[in-house]
Image (spheres, grey):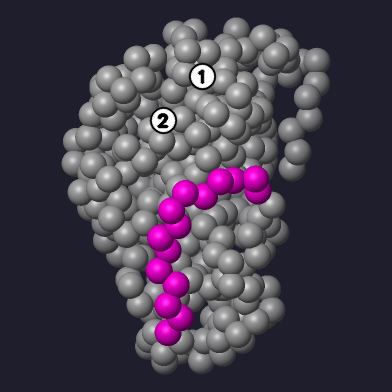
Amino acid sequence: MQNKDTLADTTTSKQNLNPDQDQLPLVVGVDLGGTQIRTAVLRGPTLLSRVSLMTGKNPSPGRIIPRVYTAIQEALGKAGTTIEQIAGIGIAAPGPLDSKTGVVFTPPNMAEWDHVPLRDLFTEHFHIPIFVENDANAGGLGEHMFGAGRGCNNIVYLTISTGIGGGVIIDGKLLEGVSGTAGELGHMTIDWHGERCPCGNIGCLEYIASGTSIARQANEAIHAGEGIELLTFARTMLQHSTTVPNPSALPTHGHDPATVELRFPPEETDDTILGSETGDEQQEEHLHVNARTVALAAESGIPLARAIIQNAAEAIGVGLVNIIHCFNPEIIILGGGVTQMGRMLMEPAQRVVQERAMKVPREAVRIVQAQLGDNVGLVGAGALIYYYSKQ
Ligand SMILES: [Zn+2]
């Protein structure tokens, strides 16, 4: 599943950056997540510094945006540079948003955000070029320029985590659509007799196979009395978990204050975390399992968990078939925490692709794992400056 650089790979695109990344200007990337906001000073894919803050329980723009300004200043300081040395700031934000105006509409995980003119606000504050893009599109650009999609001009990036997002690059150009909302791959219909997704459509891929959805299905089964074995497994995990929260762990169920975050060891990071405000009361009687717990339970053979993961995997397979038929990409890059489940998820998905996709586009496509990992949002945000300055 690795994309190896070959001579043929490096000669295909004018938009691909020269491998000599030392020549690239310094940029700032901002990854505006529902749980955590990260900022970094970058040169190409290389992070020179990184400063993160938790969005906390009140992520109103008036409270969050000044804190992002401060985080950027700290990141500049850590990198030993100043804003005058920076070519631009790229912001990867949850959609829907208009990348042409830099206005973020109403992201589902960001209460009180309603038509926030993010680009204008940042421009007034920093007086350098600012680019705002849907986080999945930014991630797709990052993988195109610096990750698994280097050398490829027809790419679909599919990120499966709390939600499911897509970034589609055709002939080296990001597919935006007339309103800037193209590539909402998580909201393609998989089950047209299915349940209604919050987006308004029915049977969306996201509503079946996202981490949130995997957790929801498990918790519904537990509440219906069908998940005794899974609940016992989750309780055992909770008793043996560490006490340090990992914000990038697979998502828990919604934002219910009674939700218990299961704890996992933190990833190795040199992050500075500003003002952590995670609620951490542990109320086992209100235990909600998250997608990661479901995955671990499936691995240990618990039938309910296996069935939920199998169903999600097949839905992803159907989604991949649709992507192959619609876009005829040379590469589909899978990112996001849910794809870390590996074979348990990917084997059933690949089987669906082999059984159902048309031969010519199926044989032309490679389905690979993303390479930028946890930093995809930051590298993608930084990539916006390199991408738009060439348009
Ligand atoms: Zn939907």
Q: Which residue is mark 2?
A: 91
Quadrant hosting residue 303: bottom right
**Residue at 41% across / 89% down in the picture?**
285
SS category of the residue bearing label 1: loop
x and y percent of residue 143 in the render?
60, 31
Q: Which amino acid type is shown beneath numbered disc 1?
A: Thr
**Which mark is drawn over residue 82?**
1
Q: Is residue 124 above or below residue 97?
A: above
How many numbered marks does the figure carry? 2
Q: Is residue 25 above or below residue 370?
A: above
**Residue at 28% across / 30% down in the picture?**
118
Left or right of 50? Residue 100 is: left
Q: Is residue 368 above or below residue 252?
A: above
Q: Which span is picked out in magenta?
A: 269-283
**Which of pointers 1 and 2 lies earlier in the amino acid sequence?**
1
Q: Which label sits in the foreground, 1 or 2?
A: 1
Quarter of the image for the N terminus: give it.
top right
